[in-house]
Amino acid sequence: MTTPVHPLAVLLVELVPTRPAPSASRGPWTEAEQDEHWAQLCEAVGTPGASRPVSRQPAA
């Protein structure tokens, strides 16, 4: 004889989201990918052609 499963327990198992398996890391973006992404961001916010900010390297 099997133990009856409470209906609420069945619903909780169905409704509780689970985290997907982590995807493989694809490494840092290439300079071309960064440029394309910046251009898309500028277009989205209405400032096409805006120059990218200069990245600041942390002091050693």
Image (tube, rainbow, N blue to C red):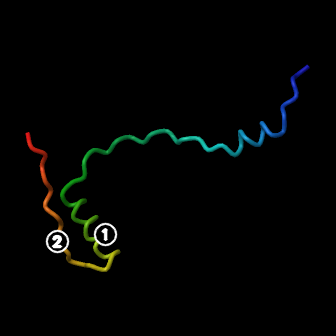
Residue at position x 25%, y 52% in the image:
29
The residue where tag 2 is placed is 51
View extreme (top): residue: 1
View extreme (left): residue: 60
The residue where tag 1 is placed is 41
CA neighbours of label 1 inside 10 A, class few (<14), some (14 to 19), many (20+): some
Q: Nearer the viewer, residue 35 or 53?
A: 53
Disc 1 is placed on an element classified as helix
Under mark 1, the amino acid is: Leu
| Label number found at residue 30 | none
Chain-order first, disc 1 or disc 2: 1
CA neighbours of label 2 inside 10 A, class few (<14), some (14 to 19), many (20+): few
Point out residue 25 in the picture as x, y percentages from the top left corner: 34, 42
Q: Quadrant of the N terminus?
A: top right
Q: Nearer the viewer, residue 23 or 55?
A: 55
View extreme (front): residue: 59
Q: Quadrant of residue 4?
A: top right
Alpha-carbon distance for marks 1 and 2? 11 Å
Point out residue 21 in the picture as x, y percentages from the top left corner: 49, 39
Q: Quadrant of residue 54?
A: bottom left
Q: Are marks 1 and 2 in contact (CB under 8 Å)?
A: no
Point out residue 13 in the picture as x, y percentages from the top left corner: 71, 39
Q: Quadrant of the C terminus?
A: top left
The correct choice, above or below, for 1 with respect to 44 in the image is: above
Residue at position x 28%, y 73% in the image:
42
